[in-house]
Amino acid sequence: MSFQPQEQVDLRPFNTLGISAHARYFTCVRIQPQLQAALRWAMENDQPWLLLGGGSNLVLAGDVPGLVIRLEMSGKRVVHEDDEHVWVRAQAGENWHELVRWTLEQGWSGLENLSLIPGTAGAAPVQNIGAYGVELKDVLEQVLVLDALDFGLKQLSVDDCQFGYRDSLFKREAGRRVILSVDLRLRKQACLQLEYGPIATELERRGIQEPTALDVSDAVIAIRQSKLPDPAELANAGSFFKNPVISAEQAAELKQQFPDMVQYPLAAGQVKLAAGWLIEQAGWKGRAVADAAVHERQALVLVNKGAATGAHVLALAAQIQADIAQRFGVRLDIEPVIVGAQ
Ligand SMILES: Cc1cc2nc3c(=O)[nH]c(=O)nc-3n(C[C@H](O)[C@H](O)[C@H](O)COP(=O)(O)OP(=O)(O)OC[C@H]3O[C@@H](n4cnc5c(N)ncnc54)[C@H](O)[C@@H]3O)c2cc1C
C-alpha cells in the first residue's frame, strides 16, 4: 500500500486543550493496512511517530517531530455472550461516550459510571480511565494490539496491561503497541456502583429509587456537566494532575495541620489526597500564565482561554507543583501525556 502523509499540519483541531502546534507529518488511518503502511513509512524514513485518538489527554509542548497517526478505525459488535454476560468488541477509533451509551441502550451494564469521558475506545486502556469508583480494568476482558517491534498482533489480558491508577504498560512504553480494539465484559443484569455520594444524591433529586444503568449514566452526565467545563466551549484536558498517594504517617501529620484536608485511605497503609482540594486551598483558582488558567470553579482543570501555548500551560503547571510541594510537602504529577518539542 503506497503511503503519502500530509505535511506541516496544525494539530489545534485535534487536541481538546486547543493548542496550536504543527505535526511535521500527519495521517489518519481507518483500516489496519493503512496503519501498517504508516508505521513502515515512519521506520523507513527514520521518523518517530505519535498515536493520536481524540487528543483529550495530551499537552502539545511544541511542534511534533515525525509522523502523527490519528486512529479512526470504527466498528463495534458482540463477540460472545452467555446467560449473565455479553462481550463487546470496539475498534480503537470508536468514540468512548457513544460506545458507553450504545451498550446501555442495548440493556447491558458496566460502563455507566464511565459516561461522558472524552476520547476514543483505543485510548481508554492507556491511562486505565476511571471515574466515580469504576476503572476500565474492571470491565476489560482483553486488548488487541499491533506491536511495532515485529508488526505482530497480540491479545493482551488485563494482567498483561499492568494497569495502575491512571497508568498502564501503554503509557509507560508509549507508541510501541497500537491498541486496535478492546473487548469489554458487560452484564445483562445490572450490578450498579453507587458508593460515590453525588450519584446517589443526583438520583434522589430525580426521584429515582430503583435506578437502571441508564439512569446512573444520566446522573453521571448531569454531575459531570455541572462540574467540568465542556472542551467544545472552554478548551481543557480534564484533570490536569493525578490525585497524590502518600504514606499514612504523612497523611496523619497533614490532617493535624489541615483538619479539613480531603483524604481517602487506601490499602497497604497509603492515603490518597484530592489534588483539586490542595490546589484550591493554595488559592490557585482563576490564576493564569498568559491564556493558560486554572478553571474558576474546578481547581484540578487547567483551561486554554484562547491563545495559550503548551509552554504557557506547562509553566502554570510547574508553578502550581512548586507551590503545593512547598506548602504541603506533596508532589503533584501531571496526568495528560506531554508531547512535542519543549
Ligand atoms: C473534560 C475532560 C474530562 C475527562 N475526564 C476523565 C475522567 O473522568 N477519567 C479519566 O480517566 N480521564 C478523563 N479525561 C482524560 C481523557 O478523556 C482520557 O484519558 C481518554 O481516554 C483519552 O482518549 P483520547 O482518544 O482523547 O486519547 P489521546 O489524548 O488522543 O491520547 C492519549 C494517549 O494515548 C495514546 N493513544 C491514543 N490512542 C491509542 C491507541 N489506539 N493505542 C495506543 N496508544 C494510544 C496517545 O499516544 C497518548 O499517549 C478527561 C478529559 C477531558 C478533556
Image (cartoon, grey):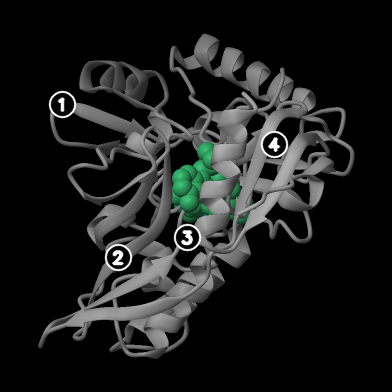
Name the residue beneath numbered marker 1.
269
Q: Select label 4 or label 2 by which is in front.
A: 2
In this figure, which residue is indicated by the disc labeled 2?
A: 183
Q: Are marks 1 and 3 in contact (CB under 8 Å)?
A: no
Reply above or below: 16 against 308. below
Q: Quadrant of residue 67?
A: top right
Q: Is residue 68 left or right of residue 180?
A: right
Q: Which residue is mark 3?
A: 92
**Foreground: disc 2 or disc 1:** 2
Within 10 angstroms of label 4, few (less than 14), some, or many (20 or more) residues? many
Residue 228 in the image: above or below residue 82: above
> Measuring 45% from the left and 83% from the top, which residue is drawn there?
102
> Which numbered marker is on residue 217?
none
- Callout 4, which amino acid? Lys
Using the numbered discs, state the Cα–Cα distance from disc 3 to disc 4 in whole angstroms: 35 Å
Of the pair 237 and 284, the residue shown nearer to us: 237
Q: Earlier in the sequence, mark 1 or mark 4?
A: 1
